[in-house]
């Protein structure tokens, strides 16, 4: 293994292939992040809906039992 440093034949710091690869990774990363975050938010929203539903049903039973006592 040689320790010599060779210069790039072109003066460009980033080639077209590197730019395309970075763009592709960025797009895929954004899609995956959006999917993951929307899944987490969807799960949280599901549990909030269940809690509200349980609260409403419990409140309805509490009201009915209160009116039956009188």
Image (cartoon, helix red, strand yellow):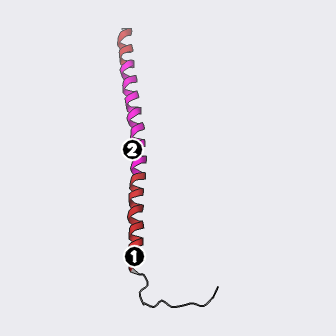
Dominant SS type (magenta): helix
Q: Residue at x 57, y 90 (%)?
A: 5
**Vertically, is 6 above or below 15?**
below
Depth check, mark 1 against mark 2: the one in front is 1
Query: Crowding near pointer 2: few (<14 within 10 Å), some, many (20+)?
Result: few
Q: Which residue is situated farthest in the right direction here?
A: 1
Mark 2 secondary-structure assignment: helix
Q: Is residue 52 magenta?
A: yes
Point 38% across, 79% down: residue = 16
Kindly indicate the quadrant of the structure image that contains residue 3. Answer: bottom right
Taking the magenta stretch, the answer to whether it contains residue 5 is: no
Tell me if residue 44 comes above or below residue 18 in the rendering: above
Q: Classify 10 Å Cα crowding around label 1: few (below 14), some (14-19), many (20 and above).
A: few
Identify residue for label 1: 19
Which residue ends up furthest to the front in the rendered image? 1
> Which residue is rendered at x = 39% and y = 67% of the image?
24
Q: Position of residue 41 (x, y in %)?
A: 40, 46
Please state which of residues 17 and 43 is positioned toward the viewer in this rendering: 17
Looking at the image, residue 25 lies above or below residue 6: above
Between discs 1 and 2, the one toward the N terminus: 1
Q: Magenta residues, as a range?
A: 37-62
Q: Vertically, is 58 above or below 16?
A: above
49 and 26: which one is in front? 26
- Would you name the residue on which mark 2 appears? 42
């Amino acid at each position: 293994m040689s320790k010599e440093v060779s210069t790039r034949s072109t003066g460009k710091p980033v080639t077209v292939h590197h730019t395309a690869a970075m763009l592709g990774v960025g797009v895929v990363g954004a899609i995956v992040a959006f999917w993951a975050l929307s899944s987490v938010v969807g799960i949280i929203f599901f549990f909030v809906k269940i809690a509200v539903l349980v609260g409403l049903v419990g409140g309805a039973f509490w009201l009915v039992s209160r009116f039956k006592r009188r």
